[in-house]
Amino acid sequence: MKREFQVQRSKFQVHCLLAALCCILIVSLLSCSFKKDQIYRKTMILMDTLITINVVSDSSDKASKAMDRAFDEIGKLDKLLNFFSSSSELSMINRNAGISAVKVSPETLEVIEDAIFVSEKTGGAFDSTIGPEISLWDFHTRKMPDDKTVKERLPLVDYKLIRIDRNKSTVYLEKKGMLIDLGAIAKGYAADKAVEELKRQGITSGLVSCAGDIRAFGLKPDGKPWKIGIKNPRPANKEDEIMATVGLSDMAISTSGDYERFFISNGRRYHHILDPKTGYSAEGCRSVTVIARYGFQTDAFSTGVFVLGPRKGMELLRQMGFEGVIVDKDGGIETTPGLKGRIEFKGNN
Amino acid sequence: MSLRETINGTTAGDRVLFIFLLLVSFIGIFFIKEVLPRGNEVVIEVEGRVAYEYPLDSDRTVKVESRYGHLTVEIRKGKVRVVDASCPNKLCEHQGWVSSGAIVCLPNRISILVGSQEKPKDGAVDATAG
């Protein structure tokens, strides 16, 4: 009897032990599944702006290493393409305008070629040689140039005067005084390069935001696309700052707006998106959002379409097979047909 | 009574209870770490690295320095502002009090991230274009 009781007791203990082990196993599995597919985020100030990288990974170390490598890539581009740094390759090209061709790295060559491609497609509405005009303006101190100087410098704005020798990897600006400013393409291009680096590091899903130039790839841990807000160009209050949201995966998005750097003088809004043909702020739109495969495309085309205005801009988006949203100067909103059902407008928009 | 005697003196029920309590503690630690939201925080990053982390509900004034310049950051009543910046434009100073979001000083390479560090809620955007 006693022996039977002991056997039962030890059986009971074994069952208890097994149950406890099962519990431990379930808890460990649960914690593993929580560790899997987390979003890791890092921000850094580079290219004179705030850059945020999100990656989906099962390991904090792997995510951190990949993000650091991607930031290194952006930092490298910042050194090459910074308009304000005297040691950048871009400054070397600009200093040697009308003097000599400058040997540059493959990245600098590629981004300038990309810029020329967008200039051709937009009929010069996007032009990276806008430097001599943009440097006349200071939107913080409300410095406005005199009309004579604006007109005098217009002949220096012409992307057709950029000479590229791919074999020698050189860039030459034909006229002295010409200045390439890659401010409307470099951040999108940097997002592309950062995504390439993240993929090389084994990351399959992430989001790189170079200020407002964003490139998404893969899906979030919940299986949904990345949710991107589009800024309202005229928010009435803090709750109204986002005009619409759109889900993105394996695409890039950029918005160019007249609200980023601007001042108002005599009832007229002067902002940083200059029309290369006049040297003054383009007037047809309040904001233009472009969605395309690559960041360099969305960054540069959003500027080009802004300058072209709503009608020609929408036509160009259609020709290029891009999606987009244009807010015209009166606040009217037009979207490309492909975005219908994918974009969600908020409130009164 | 020695430890061995104590262990020998326990019944199966005692041991089950012990394992159960141990499990509850582990789950508790895990739950607090992973599931419960962290409180509102102020994270100050200098040149991309976290330099300071403070709770948003404890008032203080901090001087933050980078290779490029310095900022004086004030945390008061759940809000944050830059009181003094060494850069010429002082855009971060003009931004005023912030209770969520970020204050970024580009010239000094300092960013101040304000608010909850918990995972974004449903409906929040992952990034904003523009």
Image (tube, coloured by chain):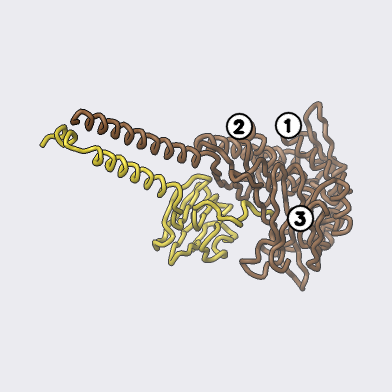
Chain colours: A brown, B yellow
Label 1 and label 3: CA atoms lie apart by 40 Å
In the image, farthest residue toward the bottom:
A266
Query: What residue does disc 3 label?
Result: A341
Q: Quadrant of residue A240?
A: bottom right
Q: Quadrant of residue B23?
A: top left
Residue at 47%, 37% (x, y): give it. Answer: A32
Query: What residue does disc 2 label?
Result: A202
Q: Amino acid at mark 3?
A: Gly
Secondary structure of the residue carrying tag 2 is loop
Tell me which label, 1 or 3, sits earlier in the chain. 1
Q: Amino acid at mark 2?
A: Gly
Residue at 65%, 44% (x, y): give it. Answer: A85
Residue A8 seen from this side: yes
Rendering coords of residue B85 (x, y %):
52, 59
Secondary structure of the residue carrying tag 3 is loop
Tell me which label, 3 or 2, sits earlier in the chain. 2
Residue A260 seen from this side: no
Secondary structure of the residue carrying tag 1 is helix
Rendering coords of residue A317 (x, y %):
84, 50
Q: Is residue B12 left or right of residue A153?
A: left
Do circles 2 and 1 both sit on a common chain?
Answer: yes
Query: What residue does disc 1 label?
Result: A106
Q: Is residue B54 left or right of residue A166?
A: left
Q: Is residue A304 left or right of residue A104?
A: right
Rendering coords of residue A2 (x, y %):
18, 31
Front-most of residues A46 and A17: A17
